[in-house]
Amino acid sequence: MVTPPFLVSAPGKVILFGEHAAVYGKPAIAAAISLRSYLLTTKHEPEFSELVTLEFPDIKFQYSWKIHSLPWDVVPKGSIDTVRPPSELNTTLVEALEHALVDVHIPLQRSAALAFLYLYICLCSPDMPGMTFSVRSTLPIGAGLGSSASVSVCLAAALCLVSGEVSPPEKKGDDDSDFNAANYAGIELIDAWAFLGERCIHGNPSGIDNAVASHGGAVMFQRMTKGNPNVRESMRSFPPLKLLLIDSRQPRRTAVQVANVATLLQNYPLVTEPILNGIHALTDEAYKLLQTPKENCDDAWEERLRELVRVNHGLLVALGVSHPKLEAIRMAADELEIGETKLTGAGGGGCAITLVKRGVDIDESRICGLIERLEGHGFEVFETSLGGVGAGCLLPTKSEAAEWEEWEEKLFSLHHLLGLGDREDIQKTVGVGSIDGWAFW
Ligand SMILES: Nc1ncnc2c1ncn2[C@@H]1O[C@H](COP(=O)(O)OP(=O)(O)O)[C@@H](O)[C@H]1O
Ligand SMILES: C[C@@](O)(CCOP(=O)(O)O)CC(=O)O
Ligand SMILES: [Mg+2]
């Protein structure tokens, strides 16, 4: 059992091929990005020990519940397999939590609070001390970069740590590929619980986003079908791709986009199924291309990959999940002949990626021109790298633990930062890659 205060973090992701089709058991390819969510867990002062507090400053939400007022009796200890959580939500628990959420009306706040309470009831117990869970993200929210999954993974990781279901990650050796069985078991469990968090937030997730946010790197993922388990294949020799990541800043919810595709499939199965099968076939093609050894990734290889990006976007348009702003981004990149563009994530707004041409016929000034044009239209262009680390934890080392008070003070001042700082402040002060001490499962 880990005693607060401590921090956990998990990355967002970019889906390169196969979104939406992934929900129907087709393969998809995604990679972790350097933008992440951070969750600070602190213990309440004794006078507030009967409360559990949730703080989501990014979505202007803060709430405290009396721990004993929560519906603990719906899932008595021992009735839930915490080591192999089911993949379906317990609907009785979801209904029982209505009461705790009766004052929370805004859907984006309500679904995130439900994810927290659901995992809290399943993983913790009413005799635990009062704690505060504060979440901040350097990711844009509801923009297709998997903020919901990175938050779900943070919640699952923090709750698994305080309940003792999972131990903190053991430091790996210098070789990043070192396999550590305890870490692997820990992150598999966090991933499985985070999937239930994603279910609370958007109903019918494929599981690709929480898989990438937990494990990091780049993966080919295929949701389980008819009793076969999920496939999650780590793509270690992922070639370096030059991508622009552009946020249309058009808000949308994944839950709504996924439900729209489900309705289309229901109304026009003979039309929609072939589109999903087309996405399946092109993801298979892309998978083969992305396995090509680096030395063979020539101009023709790049051209084929860009072609697949274009076709994937076209099929997503046919599913009805584009948006005029996403089309404006695609057209700007097409006009300047920068590369091929597709929406990423659930669409309906949010982000697009442009797979940039390389080689002699494209110079940096053309790319700068595109960025200027996009920013002029109010879009935001992100710089990020693909294939970063997965979920991690920042705990005091043994020597720091001797100076426990100092550590507590440091993290309490972070609490203030998590409430008020901007994305850059957070990245600089606690960010993975900016400060030492992070360990990854
Ligand atoms: N930083 C955050 N704080 C609280 N809730 C968040 C945060 N980021 C995401 N969420 C939750 O996830 C939802 C967005 O998820 P979703 O619609 O799947 O879009 P995406 O995952 O592409 O960002 C939000 O409406 C909110 O419920
Ligand atoms: C549309 C979908 O394929 C991806 C959704 O990603 P995001 O929430 O928009 O980041 C749904 C899923 O796979 O769970
Ligand atoms: Mg999401």
Image (tube, grey):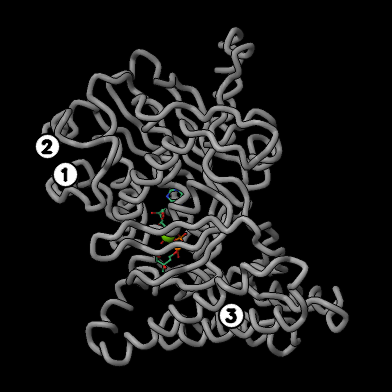
Give me the residue at 62% from left, 83% from top: 330
- Residue type at mark 1: give it: Leu
Q: Which residue is mark 3?
A: 309
In primary-sequence order, the first of circles 1 and 3 is: 1
- Local secondary structure at mark 1: helix
x and y percentages locating residue 291 in the rendered image: 62, 67
Q: Earlier in the sequence, mark 1 or mark 2?
A: 2
Check disc 3 and give the amino acid type.
Val
- Between the residue at mark 1 and the residue at mark 3, the CA separation in whole angstroms equals 41 Å
Rendering coords of residue 143 (x, y %): 50, 64
With 380 as the anchor, is 102 left or right in this view? left
In space, the residues marked 2 and 3 are separated at their CA atoms by: 47 Å
**Which residue is label 1 attached to?**
93
Label 2 SS: helix
Label 2 Cα neighbours within 10 Å, binned few <14 / some 14-19 / many ≥20: some
Do labels 1 and 2 touch, CB within 8 Å?
A: yes
Q: Which mark identifies residue 74? A: 2
Residue 81, by quadrant, is top left
- For mark 3, give the secondary structure: helix
